[in-house]
Image (cartoon, rainbow, N blue to C red):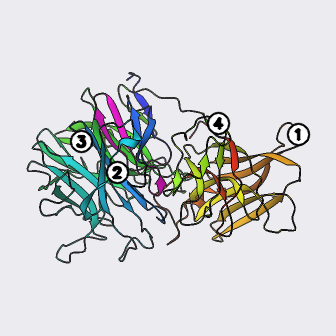
Amino acid sequence: MSSSGAFKNPIIPGFNPDPSICLVNDDYFLVTSTFEYYPGIPVYHSKDLLQWELIGHVITRHSQINMRTTEPSGGLWAPTIRYHEGRFYVSVGCTHRFRPKEWVSFPLDIVIPRGFYVSTTNIWDSSSWSDPTFFDVPGIDQDLFFDDDGKVYFSAVNMITDPRVKKHGLGLAIFTAQIDLATGRCLGPVKWNRLSNFGLGIAEGPHIFKKDGYYYLSTAEGGTDEGHQQWIFRSTTGPFGPWEEGPEGTVNPVIFNGDDPSIRNTGHLDFIETPNGKWFAVFLGVRPQGEKSELLSQLGRETFMSPVEWIDGWPIVNSRKPISLQMQTEGMQLQAQPQVWRDNFQESTLQLGWYHLRTPLKNDYSLTEKPGSLSLYGNAYRINDSECPSMLLQKQTGFSGEWKVKFQFAPTEAGHEAGTAIWWSQFAYASIGLRKPFDEDKAGLEVVSRCYDEVEDKFKELTHQLPLESGDIELFIRAHPTRYELFFSVQTDKQSTPAEPVKLGEISSKALTHRRPGKESPNTGSHFAIYAQGAYDRPCFEPAHFEFAEWRVVSETD
């Protein structure tokens, strides 16, 4: 590490919430949540905590997970990664039913899953992760703790439904149980380990670790919006407590950015010790937008980092100052951010970083059918259906830039369509594509945009008829901190290059993040997508051939 003494947050930009981290020799490995996106749980690697490379995913096959109609913001929540005796373990759960209506009273329309862990001895090979070993007790935000005496403890989060247990607010609380690692079975009673006594009554994201004779329990409290904060407790007895609460005002909350204009919602924290004995914390946060920071971040919850000092046996994060976009700490160096990302589809396998919506039943794409391009066949599901459409997505990693794709598509059936989108969920997105008109009296093809309007709570469609001699088409999405503009450019037989882009739609970032009971995705973030789709429950018979997809940063102020 350099000695310049500063680094930039977030360390992993874009939709990367709930980070968990471990160190093996001098290699750091970090995982984040993916919710309804697949493959599940990205694995990032770094040598210096600043430069992170995506090296694979934990969940990559049907025998591990099969998300069919998993709802927006359902799926894989808050994994924990740990390394023990030569093996990596990732514990997590998959929430299939998640329909948030009201968060302040019962009943919540959610089915809490039985979590599981998977493991591998070779973290560099995504195919090596095991099939799941399931735990007995339902819960979210699973954590594994390996004690020095060989015992293993499982912690997670659930609602308190036992009327004998006094609760505050929602009563979303943390429990712990000793388990048999081989089977996942509980070896003794399940104990409530943390019941939050303020705000919404939420304690989640547990991590238990040990240092200098103390057991520590780190918890995320207050919910994951602006009340989000991190608390710490310690015990000399064991992972069931009793727990001593860190003094409020000097230790707790460990992090809490409140209504800071730059970074909010900080929490779901995991600690890491470097080889030279320094400590850091990784955690989620959001970067609000708008002139007065009044808008939710369309990028969603990102991964941030802060230095940690230990004072009187307690971890002090960033000297108890608010987390900032530029952090001061000895031995760190500001890193230049990539300005261009591009996939020319030259390889025989899909580049890391593309995601499906839910688990695909089979591949709808080919990288060999037309070498040098990605051939995408539209299946019978459309992109707003609650299944797995023919859509591939990339996380948006900056607020200002231009997303561009070039493709050829010659559909012969009415309503068949291919294109690109800025995506939040099936309830909130903007797409622009090439379509065979539903009106059979119209010859040729049309460009169609479909943008969600949060004021009228509906999608609005615009079309532009193309000349019969149209050739290759380029689609653009210009991203700004508070809005997106959708353009197309068509190359005709008489042109050697595409014409000037034509605007055919716009969506605000507020429309993406707009909260509507029963129709929202509060836990995810924006993606750029390429898609193809059939109509009337029938698939496309002709593929869309995508030559490239590109993201280019326009502003360096993100």
Asked whether the beta carbons under mark 3 and mark 1 sit within 8 Å of each other, the answer is no
Q: How crowded is mark 2: few (under 14 residues within 10 Å), some or many (20 or more)?
A: many
Q: Position of residue 173 (x, y in %)?
A: 26, 64
**Badge nearest the viewer, 1 or 2:** 1
Residues in magenta? 15-40
**Mark with earlier residue (1, 2):** 2
Between 305 and 123, the one lying in front of the other is 123
Q: Is residue 31 magenta?
A: yes
Asked whether the beta carbons under mark 1 and mark 2 sit within 8 Å of each other, the answer is no
Mark 3 and mark 4: Cα distance apart in space: 46 Å
**Mark with earlier residue (2, 3):** 2
- SS type, badge 1: loop
Q: Is residue 224 left or right of residue 450?
A: left
**Badge nearest the viewer, 3 or 4:** 4
Up-down: is 456 above or below 115? below
Give the amino acid type for the residue marked by disc 1 in the picture. Gln
**Mark with earlier residue (3, 1):** 3
Residue bearing mark 3: 315
Residue bearing mark 2: 79
Which residue is at a point 13% across and 38% down the rendered structure image?
Answer: 212
- SS type, badge 3: strand
Which residue is at a point 49% across and 42% down the rendered structure image?
Answer: 13
Residue bearing mark 4: 344
**Badge nearest the viewer, 3 or 1:** 1
Mark 2 and mark 3: Cα distance apart in space: 22 Å
Between 4 and 343, the one lying in front of the other is 343
Residue bearing mark 1: 495
Give the amino acid type for the residue marked by disc 2 in the picture. Pro
